[in-house]
Image: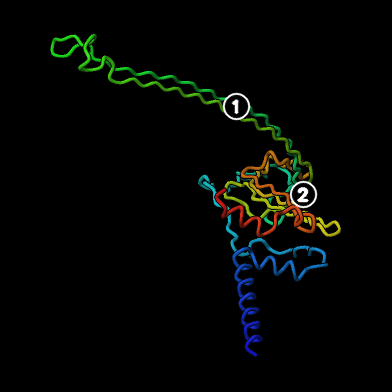
């Protein structure tokens, strides 16, 4: 009877310890993964980004807005960007295509060399008018110090990144100066792997081409992220224990 109580206490203690460990090392994610074993990753629902927790409208320094004025017997309106209306994105909710074309390559090689040699020597040849070169009362050399230092450091970086794709973005906000805040998300599921692409930033209406496309190099404050989640991504990530040890161990 007593042994069964000990077993019950030990099991409850072990369970509490495991729950505490899961809480410290992202237990919610682990529980979700356990609940979704054997199931495919689910696509996120299409929601209004402005209603999500943590959403903050973009605020940038803006010039003083100028009121629109109309001249008599004229179709031109002050502040208009074009005489005829086109189909390019211009208002909140409009859609435009972002052409992501990233091809970065960097090769850095640095080398630093330092060398220094020091020598110090102090001696007393005479004291109170008496020569000490041949005497034995005091030594001829009181202090002698020598030192040398040599440092050689080398560093090399080779980086190459390429990403070419298209993604449709939605105008989320129109700034007072007419610039557009756009954001686009794309999810592609292949078998048990889900790929995500996110593009966001600020664009000028003048930079939008006539076919309602814009190159990613013309997006200010650009945020481009490509990642994924699924079986392959999980296998490529270290286990929770390894990550904890990497953070805590000083060696």
Which type of secondary structure does the marked residue at label 2 adopt? strand
Identify the residue at horizontal 73%, vertical 54% (top origin): 185
Foreground label between 1 and 2: 1
Q: Quadrant of residue 40?
A: bottom right
In this rendering, is residue 194 above or below 151? Answer: below
Specify whether 142 is left or right of 48. left
> How many C-alpha atoms fall within 10 Å of the one at disc 1: few (<14), some, or many (≥20)?
few
In this rendering, is residue 141 above or below 79? Answer: above
Q: Which residue is mark 1?
A: 110
Q: Nearer the viewer, residue 53 or 5?
A: 5
Which type of secondary structure does the marked residue at label 1 adopt? strand
Q: Nearer the viewer, residue 37 or 122?
A: 122
Circles 1 and 2 in contact, beta carbons < 8 Å: no
- Residue 74 appears in the figure: no
Task: Measuring from the top left, give residue 217's x and y in whole percent.
Answer: 69, 38
In this rendering, is residue 48 above or below 203? Answer: below
Specify the farthest residue to the right: 191
Task: Measuring from the top left, give residue 100's x and y in whole percent.
Answer: 75, 43
Specify whether 234 is left or right of 223. right
Q: Quadrant of residue 72?
A: top right
Identify the residue at horizontal 79%, vertical 44% (top origin): 165
Specify the farthest residue to the front: 136
Task: Measuring from the top left, give residue 156's x and y in whole percent.
Answer: 64, 30
Quarter holding the N terminus?
bottom right
Task: Measuring from the top left, give residue 35's x and y in whole percent.
Answer: 75, 71
Q: Which residue is mark 2?
A: 167
**Distance in Å between CA atoms under marks 1 and 2:** 38 Å
Q: Nearer the viewer, residue 28 or 139?
A: 139
Identify the residue at horizontal 36%, vertical 21% (top origin): 145
């Amino acid at each position: 009877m007593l042994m069964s109580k000990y077993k019950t206490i030990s099991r409850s203690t072990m369970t509490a310890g495991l729950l505490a460990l899961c809480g410290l090392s992202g237990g919610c994610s682990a529980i979700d993964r356990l609940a979704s074993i054997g199931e495919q990753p689910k696509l996120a629902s299409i929601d209004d980004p402005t209603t999500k927790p943590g959403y903050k409208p973009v605020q940038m320094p803006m010039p003083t807005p100028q009121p629109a004025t109309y001249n008599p017997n004229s179709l031109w309106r002050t502040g208009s960007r074009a005489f005829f209306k086109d189909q390019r994105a211009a208002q909140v909710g409009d859609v435009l295509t972002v052409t992501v074309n990233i091809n970065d390559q960097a090769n850095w090689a640095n080398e630093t060399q330092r060398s220094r040699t020091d020598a110090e020597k102090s001696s007393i040849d005479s004291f109170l008018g008496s020569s000490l070169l041949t005497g034995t009362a005091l030594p001829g050399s009181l202090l002698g110090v020598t030192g040398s230092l040599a440092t050689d450091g080398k560093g090399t970086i080779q980086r190459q990144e390429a990403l070419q794709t298209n993604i449709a973005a939605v105008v989320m906000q129109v700034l007072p100066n007419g610039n557009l805040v756009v954001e686009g998300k794309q999810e592609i599921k292949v078998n048990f792997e889900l790929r995500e692409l996110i593009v966001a930033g600020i664009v000028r209406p003048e930079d939008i081409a006539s076919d309602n496309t814009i190159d990613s190099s013309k997006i200010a404050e650009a945020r481009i992220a490509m990642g994924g989640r699924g079986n392959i991504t999980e296998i490529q990530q270290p286990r929770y224990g390894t990550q904890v040890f990497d953070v805590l161990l000083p060696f």
